[in-house]
Amino acid sequence: MEIESMVANSALIKAREGGGSKGRSWRWREMFRFPHISQCADLAMTIERDYYSLCVKQPIGKQLFQLFCRSRPDLQNYISLQDALDAFETKSDDLRRESGFGIIQRFFRTQSIQCVSIMLQHEQSCIQRLELDPCLDVFHECREDLHKLLSGEPFIQYQESMFFDRFLQWKMLERQPITKQTFRQYRLLGKGGFGEVWACQMRATGMMYACKKLEKTHVKKRMGEAMALNEKEILEGLDSRFVVNLAYAYETKHALCMVLTMMSGGDLRFHIHNIGEPGLDKKRVRFYAAEVCCGLIHLHQKSILYRDLKPENILLDDNGHIRISDLGLAVRLSEGKLVRGVVGTLGYMAPEVIGRKHYGMSVDWWGLGCLIYEMTAGHPPYRVKGEHPNASEMERRIQAEQPEYGDKFSKAAKNICSSLLNKDPEQRLGCQSSGGSEVKAHRFFRKINFRMLEAGLVKPPFKPDPRLVYCSDVQDIDEFSSVKGVTLDQTDNNFYSKFNTGRVPISWQNEVIETGCFKELNTFGHEGSRSPDLDW
Ligand code: ADP
Ligand code: MG
Ligand code: MG
């Protein structure tokens, strides 16, 4: 490896280790200086007063609302109950029954000092469910009732409190403009169609991210505006542990930038083909397939068709969990509608795509079949190693041939692949009315506990080595060529301003909380004082 590469890698590895408070700029408090509350007046007038958004969905909003309730003796038990219900969701299956009964004893019984009286009516049904199967959504109605209660009087009083003032101050920080100075840049990670992807670190919090840059001239020359905006808008509407998160969208003089969850473990193509014998062991195949399956279900629930499933686009994080990335080809389907268009990567395209038919979610289930096949066999279903059939031969095979299942395939693996690779989308696994749940129920996944998997409670079978950088050496990634003869004008600016929306609230708020910045900064002055100490 060349010296330049080694230096770039060790800088990145060091930053990753220090990720979090150690990576913060020494000026970090200054970057987070709260505006005076009088500067929040406009925001206070325009912000939508929606309980669910302000007190449930937005992480900082939720924290401040909870702090408000804790400051009020008559509301404390509600928040303790909410915490207990949240904690219940993170319990592994074997601890759920015990934890559930604990909640009932603490909050559902008149003799308990923490009794929440509106819960009494749910006691019997919750006990029944816990006894039947603690993995059910035991406390669903309880949670709903609690929200109903909190969204009334408490929510109104919260908006009159210093805690809501503080929320507005955080929202103002959230809206600060983003510049190049907001981030520190590390090594180049990869190259995409419109530009490069770099490792970067948010200076104020120390959080590591991957910044996907789209060169403005390239986008314009290849008329990629709609595609870029589409990718950004789809990503910003998602919130899944199985799909990369968008945290910031901004522009520089030359590029549009999407700041995404950092995935340091490399892509599945690398793991399948570049480490030892091609292919992965059974446990990893099953685990990655299950996580991808959950990611696809999340997308499909939001009516988003992904269309680009292949090993290259499935990335590993430092713990070994995967996320689906590169949503450049994803489309939102309007209700019941199908789309057309030959897009994707040839080797992974479904027969209905190649056949220029209208299609829907079926093509993603085909893609999952290709993925499971390739992870198992060490090569994609319709092409063997070292072979480069031309496009029409590939199309013929996809439409007419059955892949071969060697002895690396267990019965269940063979069965799920051939069901997902059914040429007829009407007959394919995952394409019936039950959708993805049919895939999850396949016996290939019988050892996967999907509830735990979706709650992030399953330990990955493989953890990437934190001292390795799982991508090509810096000098092996081709330089991004420049485009000449393209001039940018006013119509381009209109598009850029649609793209340049800055921080994505939920991602940014999570970042501020996870890195500990929220806790360190969110102090209040003397009891009852409303503003003097808010501005320091
Ligand atoms: P394109 O849409 O142009 O193909 P991608 O989104 O696939 O761009 O990104 C190009 C490359 O950058 C990927 O193949 C991968 O190596 C790297 N990359 C992309 N996103 C991330 C990420 N979140 N973390 C780490 N590396 C990434
Ligand atoms: Mg890509
Ligand atoms: Mg793309």
Image (cartoon, rainbow, N blue to C red):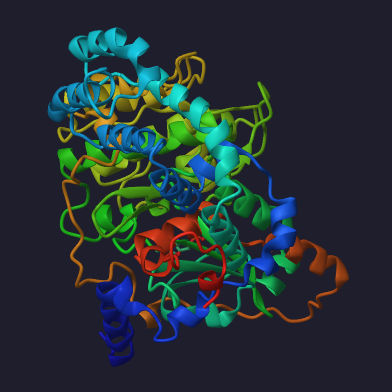
Badge count: 0
Relative to residue 419, is residue 50 depicted above or below? below
Relative to residue 68, is residue 214 depicted above or below? below
Q: Quadrant of residue 402?
A: top left
Relative to residue 220, is residue 283 depicted above or below? above
Estimate the x, y position of residue 32 in percent, counting from the top left.
50, 74
Query: Do we see residue 383 in this rendering?
Result: yes
Viewer-side residue, 250 vs 511: 511
Estimate the x, y position of residue 360 in percent, counting from the top left.
58, 27
Residue at image coords 28%, 42%:
456
Q: Quadrant of residue 111?
A: top left
Residue at image coords 24%, 8%:
128
Viewer-side residue, 449 vs 305: 449
Estimate the x, y position of residue 449 in percent, counting from the top left.
22, 28
Quadrant in the picture for the N terminus: bottom left
Query: Do we see residue 184 in this rendering?
Result: no
Q: Decide if residue 222 is on the left or right side of residue 275.
A: right
